[in-house]
Amino acid sequence: MKNFKISGCGTALVTPFKNGVVDYEAYKNLVIRQVEAGVDYLVPLGTTAETPCLTLKEKVRLLTITKENAAGKKLVVGVGANSPITTIENMEIMGPCGADAFLVVVPYYNKPTQDGLYSYFKAVAEATDKPIFLYNVPGRTGINLSTETTLKLAEIDNIVAVKEASSNYAQIAAILRSRPEGFMVFSGNDDETLSLMATGADGVISVASNIAPAEVTELTHCMLEGNYARAREIYFRLLPLFKNCFVESNPIPAKAALSCMGLCENELRLPLASAQPATCELMEKTVRELGLLK
């Protein structure tokens, strides 16, 4: 199973809404835009997609649209919940809809021990023959997946990668130093892509690439090819975008940017609210300076 290989930029796709319902036509166009920009793989139904606020019917249709328009690119599909029963049910439903691998977030709210986290991910992995990506984002879940637990889970055949968004460089470097052969590590934060890939990470699962897919993809490819001077140039150009995408809770600023680009409405599903006027102005300025406004 560790022969499942991807690298570079994967976009954590947003879910467009219009008048309170999913805007499937806008979503299709966003997927096509990603493919045409050359991103390496797609990550639908992650937390950037506001998945906790989507119905099962909406999730299935979104994944079906993604598969139909992905032009053969791999799909790493978010299925995580805070219950193994729900997570496994999600895998059983999403697998036949086109998932190539599953992204499973650390269970939120429960605050399990490291033993509990190991047992949870082991049970999830045993319930599928598809590859599993761990997702560590303690700022959202309230608990950190430790280096030791990550490396122990990495020994399980179909646990093939971790999306690391802990912002703990020492922890991530320790994982990179001791990971088993074939186990992939992806930055979960755009602004850490350069430093983590310089340390050996395989790429990024990106929010900013919703807005600038070609540019973030080029950044990762330059790092993979060892063209560090060009990578730094791109990184410094994109750094304001990376930072500004998180001036409010993700994906609020990203949707504000996509809205001013005419790609979707500036609309989210409660409890997330649309961007404040100052954020809208900031994101318009950011994408304008990147030359992304028509």
Image: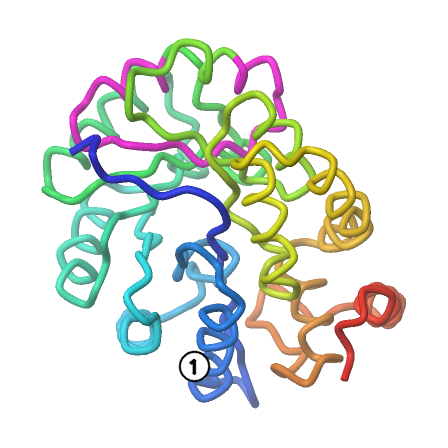
Position of 27 with respect to 133 (left or right) is: right
Q: Is 162 in the magenta?
A: yes
Q: Position of residue 123 (x, y in %)?
A: 16, 31
- Residue ID at (19%, 53%): 91
- Residue ID at (38%, 37%): 107
Q: In the rendered view, would you say 151 is above or below 29? A: above
- Residue ID at (48%, 45%): 8
Q: Position of residue 134 (x, y in %)?
A: 36, 34
Q: Which residues are magenta?
A: 149-173
Q: Position of residue 120 (x, y in %)?
A: 24, 29
Q: Is 171 in the magenta?
A: yes
Which quarter of the image is occupied by the C terminus? Answer: bottom right
Which residue, given by chain and number where applicable, does mark 1 sit on? 28
- Quarter of the image holding residue 250? bottom right
Q: Position of residue 287 (x, y in %)?
A: 79, 68
Q: In the rendered view, would you say 145 is above or below 261? A: above
Could you say which is closer to the camera, residue 234 or residue 29? 234
Dot 1: few (<14), some (14–19), or many (≥20) neighbours within 10 Å?
some
